[in-house]
Amino acid sequence: QVQLVESGGGLVQPGGSLRLSCAASGFTLDSYVMTWFRQAPGKEREAVSCISSSGGDTYYADSVKGRFISSKDNANNTVYLLQMNSLKPEDTAVYYCATRPWLCSIIPTQYADWGQGTQVTVSS
Protein backbone atom coordinates (compact mmCIF):
# COMPACT_ATOMS: atom_id res chain seq x y z
CA GLN A 1 0.00 0.00 0.00
CA VAL A 2 1.17 3.50 -0.83
CA GLN A 3 2.65 5.41 2.07
CA LEU A 4 3.91 8.99 2.00
CA VAL A 5 5.38 10.62 5.08
CA GLU A 6 6.36 14.31 5.10
CA SER A 7 8.76 15.92 7.51
CA GLY A 8 10.79 19.10 7.87
CA GLY A 9 8.18 21.77 8.46
CA GLY A 10 8.46 24.42 11.13
CA LEU A 11 8.65 28.10 11.92
CA VAL A 12 11.08 30.25 9.98
CA GLN A 13 11.64 33.98 9.58
CA PRO A 14 10.99 35.72 6.26
CA GLY A 15 13.95 35.22 3.97
CA GLY A 16 14.88 31.96 5.62
CA SER A 17 14.99 28.41 4.27
CA LEU A 18 13.45 25.05 5.05
CA ARG A 19 13.80 21.64 3.47
CA LEU A 20 10.83 19.31 3.37
CA SER A 21 11.15 15.57 2.87
CA CYS A 22 8.63 13.03 1.61
CA ALA A 23 9.47 9.37 2.23
CA ALA A 24 7.66 7.15 -0.24
CA SER A 25 6.97 3.41 -0.15
CA GLY A 26 4.54 0.79 -1.36
CA PHE A 27 4.56 1.53 -5.08
CA THR A 28 6.79 1.45 -8.14
CA LEU A 29 8.55 4.77 -7.91
CA ASP A 30 9.87 4.57 -11.47
CA SER A 31 6.34 4.98 -12.82
CA TYR A 32 5.05 7.72 -10.55
CA VAL A 33 5.44 11.48 -10.32
CA MET A 34 5.64 13.31 -7.00
CA THR A 35 3.87 16.60 -6.47
CA TRP A 36 4.06 19.04 -3.60
CA PHE A 37 0.84 20.87 -2.75
CA ARG A 38 0.13 23.44 -0.10
CA GLN A 39 -3.00 24.71 1.55
CA ALA A 40 -3.25 27.90 3.53
CA PRO A 41 -6.19 28.60 5.87
CA GLY A 42 -9.27 29.57 3.91
CA LYS A 43 -7.62 28.88 0.56
CA GLU A 44 -7.77 26.07 -1.95
CA ARG A 45 -5.05 23.47 -2.15
CA GLU A 46 -2.53 24.48 -4.82
CA ALA A 47 0.24 22.64 -6.61
CA VAL A 48 3.68 24.00 -5.82
CA SER A 49 5.99 21.65 -7.68
CA CYS A 50 5.98 18.33 -9.50
CA ILE A 51 8.92 16.11 -10.33
CA SER A 52 8.79 13.45 -13.03
CA SER A 53 9.34 9.78 -12.31
CA SER A 54 12.90 10.00 -13.65
CA GLY A 55 13.60 13.14 -11.68
CA GLY A 56 14.67 14.85 -14.86
CA ASP A 57 11.73 17.20 -15.30
CA THR A 58 10.15 19.55 -12.80
CA TYR A 59 7.23 21.94 -12.72
CA TYR A 60 6.99 24.97 -10.45
CA ALA A 61 4.15 27.32 -9.73
CA ASP A 62 4.95 30.89 -10.67
CA SER A 63 4.69 31.92 -7.04
CA VAL A 64 7.67 29.74 -6.05
CA LYS A 65 9.73 29.65 -9.24
CA GLY A 66 13.35 30.59 -8.55
CA ARG A 67 12.93 30.02 -4.80
CA PHE A 68 11.90 26.37 -4.42
CA ILE A 69 13.77 23.33 -5.74
CA SER A 70 12.21 19.87 -6.00
CA SER A 71 14.45 16.82 -6.23
CA LYS A 72 15.00 13.21 -5.35
CA ASP A 73 17.45 12.47 -2.58
CA ASN A 74 20.56 11.15 -4.32
CA ALA A 75 21.47 9.01 -1.35
CA ASN A 76 17.99 7.51 -1.03
CA ASN A 77 15.91 7.10 -4.12
CA THR A 78 12.69 6.79 -2.14
CA VAL A 79 12.91 10.25 -0.57
CA TYR A 80 11.73 13.40 -2.31
CA LEU A 81 12.89 16.83 -1.23
CA LEU A 82 11.50 20.33 -1.49
CA GLN A 83 14.13 22.96 -0.75
CA MET A 84 12.42 26.24 0.04
CA ASN A 85 14.52 29.40 -0.01
CA SER A 86 13.75 33.09 0.41
CA LEU A 87 10.57 32.19 2.22
CA LYS A 88 7.77 34.73 2.45
CA PRO A 89 4.85 35.02 4.88
CA GLU A 90 2.53 34.03 2.02
CA ASP A 91 4.30 30.67 1.85
CA THR A 92 2.71 29.80 5.19
CA ALA A 93 0.60 26.68 4.68
CA VAL A 94 0.33 22.97 5.30
CA TYR A 95 2.49 21.26 2.70
CA TYR A 96 1.58 17.84 1.32
CA CYS A 97 3.27 15.41 -1.03
CA ALA A 98 1.08 13.37 -3.36
CA THR A 99 1.75 10.84 -6.08
CA ARG A 100 0.10 9.57 -9.24
CA PRO A 101 1.16 7.48 -12.23
CA TRP A 102 3.19 8.92 -15.08
CA LEU A 103 2.01 12.51 -15.58
CA CYS A 104 2.16 15.58 -13.42
CA SER A 105 -1.12 17.33 -12.71
CA ILE A 106 -1.89 20.49 -10.76
CA ILE A 107 -5.41 19.26 -9.94
CA PRO A 108 -5.62 17.82 -6.41
CA THR A 109 -8.53 15.51 -7.19
CA GLN A 110 -6.36 13.63 -9.66
CA TYR A 111 -4.24 12.31 -6.81
CA ALA A 112 -5.40 9.36 -4.74
CA ASP A 113 -2.42 9.07 -2.43
CA TRP A 114 -1.35 11.80 -0.03
CA GLY A 115 0.91 12.30 2.92
CA GLN A 116 -0.36 13.63 6.22
CA GLY A 117 1.02 17.13 5.68
CA THR A 118 3.58 19.26 7.48
CA GLN A 119 3.05 22.83 8.70
CA VAL A 120 5.29 25.61 7.40
CA THR A 121 4.97 28.98 9.09
CA VAL A 122 6.90 32.01 7.88
CA SER A 123 6.75 34.80 10.40
CA SER A 124 8.96 37.25 12.22
Image: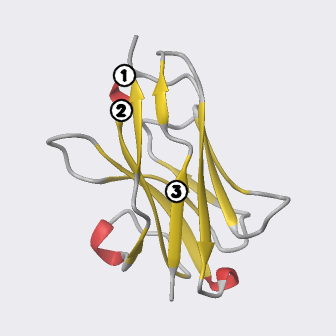
Which label belongs to residue 66? none
Give left or right: position of 80 versus 10: right
Q: Secondary structure at mark 3?
A: strand
Residue 91 percent across, percent down from the top left: 39, 32
| Residue type pointed to by label 1 | Pro
Using the numbered discs, state the Cα–Cα distance from disc 2 to disc 1 in whole angstroms.
6 Å
Q: Which residue is mark 3?
A: 6
Asked which quadrant contains residue 122, the reply is top left
Q: Which residue is mark 2?
A: 92
Image quarter in which the C terminus is found:
top left
Do the CB atoms of the residues marked 2 and 1 lie less than 8 Å apart?
yes
Give left or right: position of 5 versus 70: left
> Residue shown at 56%/43% (left/top)?
8
> Residue shown at 63%/69% (left/top)?
52
Between discs 3 and 1, the one toward the N terminus: 3
Which label belongs to residue 89? 1
